[in-house]
Image (cartoon, rainbow, N blue to C red):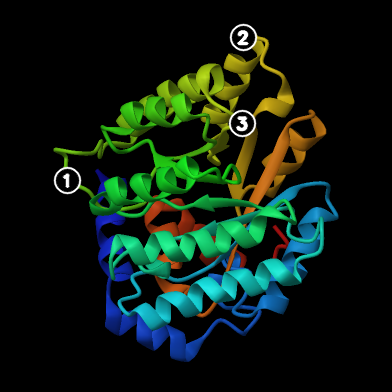
Amino acid sequence: MIATIFRLFFSMLASSALLKAAASRIGIRGRRSPARRFVAGETHDEAIAAVEAIEARGLTVTIDRLGEQVTSSAAALEAARAYVDLIGEATPGRVSRGLSVKLTQIGLDVDRATAIDNLRRVVEAAVEPGIFVRVDMEGATYTDDTLDTVETLWSIGYRNVGVAIQAALRRSGDDIRRLNALGMSVRLVKGAYRESRRIAFVRADDVDAEFRRLTELLLTEGHRPAIATHDPDLIAHARQVATARAIALDQFEFEFLYGLRRDLQTSLARDGYAVRVYVPYGREWFPYFMRRLGERPANIWFVVKNLFAERPDA
């Protein structure tokens, strides 16, 4: 119950345009800014510095230029071009061939054709340097359009694109089977958006149970899935499934959010598992930060406690 209340409260904060504008003016440039626990910085250079520190530990990275719910074609095109520029600046190994994109950042709220055109710009630019583009899943109202957009690119031959699926949504098992049949890579996440009980699991135990079920589906039938969780029990379950089914360690990866569970990242990598860190950056950090706080009450204490600790590099 407490976790549900926290999620609803911080989801409302994340959607506030007034708070978002105020946060953007304040920024997160100070080392002690609470948001710096989850966001690498506001600039490209800050993001690359965080990426290089993570890669020095033998881990891989997906980098996300934060932004969402763009409502003009010009702004959507500008966001897509910023991703293309980021790809152009990324020498092999520097961004670990991973980018993450939200479709509402590149035009989905304008229309689906705009999102498809702009995603194609990004994915096409990523082909030659071998960079994989993962499309983030947003609120449930965008699920169908997100899947249709990604599948449109898949249908015309792009194989360096994948998508995230949220365990909290009741439909996700069917969506994963659909994507597995295509051969597309899926990132499994719990889900951080406020949804109704009619379409989503809202109790934490139910979400965890579904996450376990979908993990098994991805590990046994999927294509290089990313299991994105910081929960030691869910990670242990994934390891048990992989061991029981003799699934090679290079056939899947664990993914962590920047700033969370560096201890688990290190121990998994030491045990031979592929570990990736999701590194967000940019001025549009506020909604992302609010959703991280709302995921679990402990994150608030984590932020307060670590205001007096050194800034992490992962």
Q: In this view, does 6 lie to the left or right of 48?
A: left
* Residue 62 figure quarter: bottom right
Q: Residue at point 32% right, 27% down?
A: 174
Q: In this view, does 58 lie to the left or right of 151?
A: right
Question: How many labels, in total?
Answer: 3
The mark nearer the N terminus, 2 or 1, is 1
Q: How crowded is mark 2: few (under 14 residues within 10 Å), some or many (20 or more)?
A: few
Which residue bears the numbered disc 2?
245
Q: Nearer the viewer, mark 3 or mark 1?
A: 3
Provide residue 106's location: percent of width, then percent of height.
42, 68
Q: Which of marks 3 and 2 is in front?
A: 3
Q: Nearer the viewer, residue 299 or 148?
A: 148
Q: Is residue 5 left or right of residue 94?
A: left
Which residue bears the numbered disc 3?
224
Q: Residues within 10 Å of mark 1 (few under 14, many from 20)?
A: few
Which residue bears the numbered disc 1?
196
Q: Nearer the viewer, residue 227 or 141?
A: 141
Disc 2 marks a residue whose amino acid type is Arg
Disc 3 marks a residue whose amino acid type is Arg
Q: In which quarter of the image is the C terminus?
A: bottom right
Q: What element carries label 2?
A: loop
The mark nearer the N terminus, 3 or 1, is 1
Provide residue 86's location: percent of width, then percent of height.
66, 71
Disc 1 marks a residue whose amino acid type is Ser
Outermost residue toward the bottom in this view:
25
The mark nearer the N terminus, 3 or 2, is 3
Q: Which of 92 and 304 is in front in this view?
A: 92
Q: Residue at point 23% right, 38% down?
A: 200
